[in-house]
Amino acid sequence: MSAQASLSVGARPPQPDLEGPPRHGGMRARRIMGDVVSHVFLAVMAVAWLVPVAWVAAESFNADPNPYTTTFFPTEYTFDNYIQLFTDTQVMNFGKMFLRTLLIAVAVCAISVFFVLSVSFCMSRLRFRLRKPFMNGALILGMFPGIMSVVAIYFILKAMGLTTSSSGTVAALIVVYAGGSGAAFYVMKGFMDTIPFSLDEAAILDGCTRWQVFTRIILPITKPMIVYQAIVGFMTPWLDFVLAKAICRTQDNYTVSLGLWQMLQMEYIGTWFARFAAGAVCVSVPIAILFVLMQRFYQSSMSGAVKG
C-alpha cells in the first residue's frame, strides 16, 4: 500500500513548523515592564496614602495653632498640643471623652465577641426548627443600612431615660452597639462550617457536653475569626459618629469622634486645629495597640489547629 493510500480520507499531511522557537526574550521584557508599572503604581498610591497621615502627625506637633499657614509642614514643633488637649478642660474635656469611649469600646468588644460566637455555634453545629428562617431573616435585615433605625433607636432610648445623664448615655451606647452584633454571624458561621463535624462527634463520644465542645474544640480553632471580631467590635464604637451624634445630645456625653468634630467647628478651628491633629493621633493609638496584640494570636492560630 502506498503512503498516499495509508492517509485517511480528508486528512492533511503534517506541515513543517515555520514559526521557529518561542520568543522568550519578548515575553520576559513584557513581564519586566508589567512589574515596573505595577510597582510604580503601588509606590504612587502608597505616597498618596501616607502623605496625609504624615501631615496630620506633623501638624499635631505644630507650635502655631493656626491651621492656615504658608508652609505645608510645620516649621516649629512642640508637645504643648498633646498636653493642652488633656489638661485644658474649660472648653471641652477630651480626656473624659477618651476614657468614656474606651470604656464603651472595650465593653462592646467583649459582648459582641460572645454574642457572635454563640449565635454562630448554634447556626453552624445545631439543627432546630427555626434555624433557616432565622438565618434568612438576619440576611435580609443586614441588607438595610443601620442609619435607617437611628431615629427609632433614639426615641426608644429616650423613653427609657438613657439619653439625659452621662452614665445613661454610656449604657445606651453599649446596648445599641452590642445588641445587634449577634446578627452579624455569617462570617463566623462560614468559618465554623469548615471545621469537620467528626471532631464534635469524637468529643461527644469521649463524654464532652455541648459546652465543652464549644469551649475546648471550636474556640481554639476559631482564634483567627475571634481576633477579627474583636477588632471589628472595638472599632465600631470607637470610630462611629452618626449613632453617637444622635444619642449624645450634650457635650458632656460626647465620644472622641464627636469631640474631634466639635474641634473643627467655626468657633474652635482657629485655635483647636493643632489639638484636633493631636487628638486624631491619640485616637489611632488604641487601634494600633489592639492590632499588634491580636496579630500575635492570629499568626499562632493560623499555624494549624487541625492536623491530619
Image (spheres, rainbow, N blue to C red):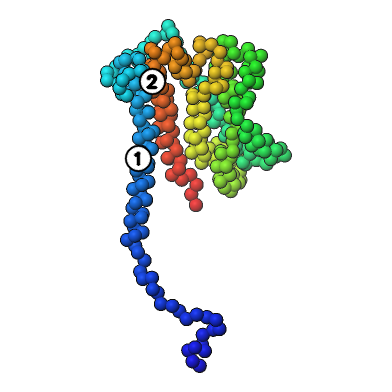
Residue sitting farthest toward the right:
129
- Where residue 277 is drawn, which disc sits there? 2
Residue sitting farthest toward the top:
90
Marks 2, 1: nearer the viewer: 1
Q: Position of residue 163 (x, y in %)?
A: 59, 13
Q: Position of residue 73 (x, y in %)?
A: 31, 23
- The image quarter in which residue 45 lies: top left
Write down the residue under mark 1.
Answer: 43
- 273 versus 211 height, above or below: above
Q: Is residue 61 visible?
A: no
55 left or right of 167?
Answer: left
Q: Is residue 308 visible?
A: yes
The disc, 2 or 1, on the residue closer to the chain's N-terminal end is 1
Q: Amino acid at mark 1?
A: Ala
Residue sitting farthest toward the bottom:
1
Q: Nearer the viewer, residue 204 or 158?
A: 158
Label 1 environment density (alpha carbons within 10 Å; few <14, some 14–19, many ≥20): few
- The image quarter in which residue 63 lies: top left
217 left or right of 260?
Answer: right
Q: In percent of the image, x 52 and y 24: which residue is there?
A: 240
Q: In percent of the image, x 52 and y 80: which residue is there?
A: 11
Mark pair 2, 1: CA separation:
25 Å
Q: Amino acid at mark 2?
A: Ala
63 left or right of 124?
Answer: left
Q: Nearer the viewer, residue 173 or 118?
A: 173
